[in-house]
Structures are given as C-alpha cells and as structure tokens.
Amino acid sequence: MSKIIQIGKHSVGIGKRPLFLPDIGTFFNQNMSLAKEIVNKLSISGVSVMKGEILHSADICLKENSGEESYWGHCSGEMQSEDYRSLIERKVISLSVYEDLFRYSQNLGMEVVVSVYDFAGADFAKDIGAVALKIASSNITHQPLISHISKLGLPIIFDTGHSSLEEVARAISWSKDVADSEVIVEHSPLGPPHPVERHSLNFMNALGAVFDIPYGLSDHHIDDEMLYAATAMGASILEKGICPDDMGDEQDGGHALPISRVKDVLVKINNVYSGLGKSTRELRHDRVKYSSRMGLVAKHNLKSGDEINLDNVTFAFPAKGIGTECWEDVCEWKLVENISKGQPISWHQVHALAT
C-alpha cells in the first residue's frame, strides 16, 4: 500500500511533515456567523487545510429511543447527558448552507477535508471539491457507506476509535475492493474525564505497522501535548477539534482547542517536526574542533626531560596543543623544552619514546 498520499496540495505520509487538521465540526451550533468567524481565524493562523463535517439530516438518528449522548463538561467538571436525537437536531444545517461555509473557506485559500455520514453528504463533499473524506469511528462497520465513498476517488481517513483491528482491517478491505482507495488510519483515544494513560499513543504506531499505511491522531486530550508527542512519533495527520474561546459545557468541548490557541499550536507542531531532523549528524566544515575540547597543560613548572604523566599534566579548555584524545599516544613521552605552569603542551615540545 502507498506510504505517501496526496491530500490536495499536501503530500502526507511516512517522513513528511504532519498535516494539521483543525476540525470545526459542529461547534458553531448552526450559527453561521460564528462558523465563518472560526474559519477566518484559522486562515489568519496559517492553517492550509481545515476539516468539517456534513451533518445535514437528523434522520441519521432514530426519532424515538435514540439513547443518550454523554460528554464531559469541562467548565462544570461533570458529565453531561443529552437525548441523542435532540443533539443532532440542534446541529444539522442544510447542504446549501454547508456549501456557503466551505466555499468561504476555499476562498480564503484553505482546502477542505470532510467527515460524512450518508451518501448525499459524501456526493456533496466530492462536488464542492473536498480533498479527502473521513469515516467516523461510528461508521467503520458501515459497508454501504464505505463502498460508496470509495468510488468517489478521494483519499479516505478512517477513525478507528472503539474499533478492533479486525473491524479496521475489514473496513480497509471494503475500500480497497471497490476502488483501491488511498487510506489513512487515525488513532482516536478516549477523551476526558479518562486519564492521560488511556491515550496509548503507541497504538497509533501499531496501526501504521499492522496495515503498512500512513497513520495519524484524532486527538481527544484536554490540552495540546499529545499533538506534539504524535508528531515526534511519526504521525502523518493531526486532527484536533477547534471551538470558540467561550465554548462552555458543549459536546466535545472538553477536548477541543480554543481558536485563539491555534496559531501557537501550529508553530509548535512545525518546530517539533523540524527539530526531529535527520538520523545522521552533519558536522560543520568550518567548526572550530578544538575550541570545545580539552588539551594537555603543564600542572606545574616543567623542565626538559620531564615525563608526560598525570603527576605533571592536567587538562583545560581549549585544546591549544595536544588534545586529550592523544593521551595514550604521548603518556610517558619526554619534554624537550621547559614549560611554565598552566601553559599548553604542544607536539614540538615532546619527544616520543624509543620503540
């Protein structure tokens, strides 16, 4: 399978700079002025690809007995519960409104990656120029949807949260059987209030190794540290929910990044990646080798004929004469001239032992 995948203008995969995917999701709660404000701030922060989702119909959820959605209220510090159907209904917006939002993003120079939940949303995303589609972890067993989006010819991001390796393998197989789609897998750890130990970032690397494809992180940590750790571990994509600064106890707000912090986080991600460098050390040709190394120095006033040994010699920066790396060579040699205390000992001042 491909180790490098093209997502719009970005080459994503092993050895490439990770692609930061700030996800505006449905954090704007049908408030399109707020949505555009978030998108505009993403652009100002230097984001080149933004992520959204297409939630255009509440009928993806049963009208009755749909169950409850529980999520962490990071302001109250308590779990919140909400009827799942009601939650969806207060977040859906029409495809025409989504088109306006995504066109606005594109006009600001940002490409768009989209999570889709049904055929209509997937086709719409393709039509408006999305550069990749995401399958949420809740749909990793949705064979009809996976097969459908695989035919659209876009890279697919599989969120693997709450999924077994067998389920992930089956989903990838469905996508490959239809159109040999380009695939990325995301590790999606549990969010708050679960402890940080449950993040298990090593499993992210395991996903990449098992399926031999690019891998990334859908981050649900309460802060930003996991993004930097994942960068250092070779993640190809870094997805993070982005919310208004005053989000309150909203669904998924407990692990979202306030919009005002995006620029700083993006800079740090790039710095961490750049800091990884190469697996070899390149030495500067103009380095002053001996300025940071010790050399041999007279411990006290020495006379011609005195021996080079630890009674007569000490070591000091910088190496103006014989360097410490030559100690085994010159130990027990004789001086051929007097040297004052504290002065470097040079090669012309010593005489080798007869062999």
Image (cartoon, helix red, strand yellow):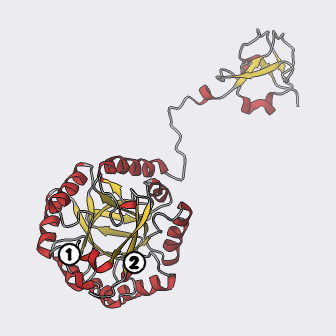
The three-letter amino acid code for the residue at tag 1 is: Ala
Q: Nearer the viewer, residue 176 or 94?
A: 94
Q: Which residue is mark 1?
A: 125
171 relative to 300, above or below: below
Q: Position of residue 252 (x, y in %)?
A: 36, 65
Regarding residue 7, the answer to whether it shows in the image is yes
Q: Nearer the viewer, residue 193 or 177?
A: 193
Count the marks: how many? 2
Q: Which mark is residue 60?
A: none
Of badges 1 and 2, nearer the viewer stands 2
Q: Which residue is mark 2?
A: 137
Q: Nearer the viewer, residue 118 or 165?
A: 118
Q: Position of residue 62 (x, y in %)?
A: 29, 87
Give the image quarter of residue 248: bottom left
Q: Earlier in the sequence, mark 1 or mark 2?
A: 1
Relative placement, left or right, of 183 versus 302 is left
At 88% from the left and 31% from the top, the residue drawn is 355
Give the image quarter of residue 53: bottom left
226 relative to 100, above or below: above
At 50% from the left and 37% from the top, the residue drawn is 284
Give the image quarter of residue 147: bottom left
Q: Position of residue 105 (x, y in %)?
A: 18, 61
Regarding residue 277, the answer to whether it shows in the image is no
Q: Secondary structure at mark 2?
A: helix
Relative placement, left or right, of 104 versus 250 is left
Q: Secondary structure at mark 1?
A: helix
The three-letter amino acid code for the residue at tag 2 is: Ser
At 83% from the left and 27% from the top, the residue drawn is 331
Relative placement, left or right, of 334 versus 182 is right
Distance from Cα at disc 1 to Cα at disc 2 = 19 Å
